Image (cartoon, grey):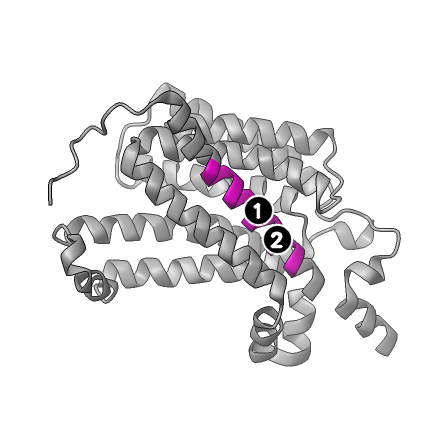
């Protein structure tokens, strides 16, 4: 199962999925709470909100998330990528505890432990389902191997 | 315009369940179609090395499955907005996020023929409970 092992670069892509999504959401939330309430009659204010620093940063992070998510799905199974990247929730909870000094309840600590154990489970297994013909699933890699 | 009362007014539990189910179904369909699209395109690392960022973007944007996936993800987003309009965030966010993990594991096995072994089932269920506890 040589190709099921991930490279350091691929682990970095997974980490980027895990970190960018919750950080992007946090930036959007922080930005939107600073914008005055927007009514349906003044939807133009939504467009203006896009150019405020927090929301622009949030959108940039979410674009980064989507690009790394698509990249991860191109070489790993969906049922591997989703739990592995749910670890981002843990990162945000820990950041809010130790950086923003927000209290974390017992239930949330239990949630952190469950996610961490779950991610440990899935990360130990293969990242990609073995296919009878790997060439059919990975045309570009097969083409590269033929060239070599 | 009359402001929406807060906390959200009581919604029939079946209507609430249907709204959350709509979010979960649309987002699962979106994730599965997007995953199928990316598998059909091939290893992005190899494509990036061969034809650069432009080539990689072109490969993604010329894949019809990708647009089908993104359309369902957009539908999931709007059904989430609809649900948030009637239900409290503390119910919708954890319920939809954690249920989606399990439905995705089922859909990945059924439609993508992924090898969802005992290890992955355990992980999906643990992470599902964990996300629920964390977001609740």
| A87 versus B47 height, above or below | above
Q: Residue at x 18, y 65 (%)?
A: A44
In this rendering, would B6 be left or right of B91?
left
Disc 2 to disc 1: CB gap under 8 Å: yes
- Quadrant of the image occupied by residue A92: top left
| A44 versus B95 height, above or below | below
User: Is B23 a magenta residue?
Assistant: yes
Q: Taken as a whole, is the magenta stretch helix, strand or loop?
A: helix
Q: Please tell me if label 2 and label 1 are on a single chain.
A: yes
Q: Report the span colored magenta.
A: B22-37
In this rendering, would A9 be left or right of B78?
right
Disc number placed over residue B33 in the picture, else none: 2
Q: Residue at x 43, y 41 (%)?
A: A91
Evaluate whether residue A8 shows in this view. Answer: no
Evaluate whether residue A70 shows in this view. Answer: yes
Residue A54: horizontal and vertical position, in percent? 25, 58
- Quadrant of the image occupied by residue A94: top left
- The residue labelled by disc 1 is B29
Residue A27: horizontal and vertical position, in percent? 29, 52
């Amino acid at each position: 199962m040589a190709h099921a092992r991930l490279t350091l670069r691929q682990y970095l892509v997974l980490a980027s999925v895990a970190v960018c999504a919750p950080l992007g959401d946090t930036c959007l939330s922080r930005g939107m709470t600073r914008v005055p309430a927007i009514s349906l009659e003044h939807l133009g204010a939504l467009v203006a909100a896009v150019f405020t620093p927090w929301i622009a940063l949030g959108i940039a992070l979410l674009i980064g998330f989507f690009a790394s998510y698509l990249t991860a799905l191109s070489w790993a199974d969906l049922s591997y990528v989703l739990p592995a990247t749910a670890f981002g929730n843990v990162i945000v909870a820990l950041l809010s505890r130790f950086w923003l000094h927000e209290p974390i309840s017992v239930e949330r600590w239990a949630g952190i432990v469950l996610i961490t154990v779950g991610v440990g489970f899935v990360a130990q297994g293969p990242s990609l389902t073995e296919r009878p013909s790997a060439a059919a699933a990975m045309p570009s890699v097969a083409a590269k191997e033929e060239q070599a | 315009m009359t402001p929406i009362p807060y906390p959200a007014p009581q919604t029939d539990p079946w209507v609430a369940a249907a709204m959350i189910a709509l979010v979960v179904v649309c987002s699962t369909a979106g994730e599965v179609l997007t995953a199928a699209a990316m598998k059909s395109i091939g290893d992005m690392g190899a494509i990036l090395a061969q034809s650069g960022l432009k080539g990689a973007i072109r490969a993604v944007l010329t894949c019809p499955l990708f647009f089908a996936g993104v359309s369902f993800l957009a539908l999931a987003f709007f059904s989430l907005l609809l649900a948030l309009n009637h239900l409290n965030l503390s119910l919708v966010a954890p319920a939809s996020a954690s249920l989606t993990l399990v439905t995705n594991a089922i859909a990945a096995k059924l439609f993508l023929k992924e090898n969802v072994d005992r290890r992955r089932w355990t992980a999906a269920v643990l992470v599902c409970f964990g996300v629920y506890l964390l977001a609740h």
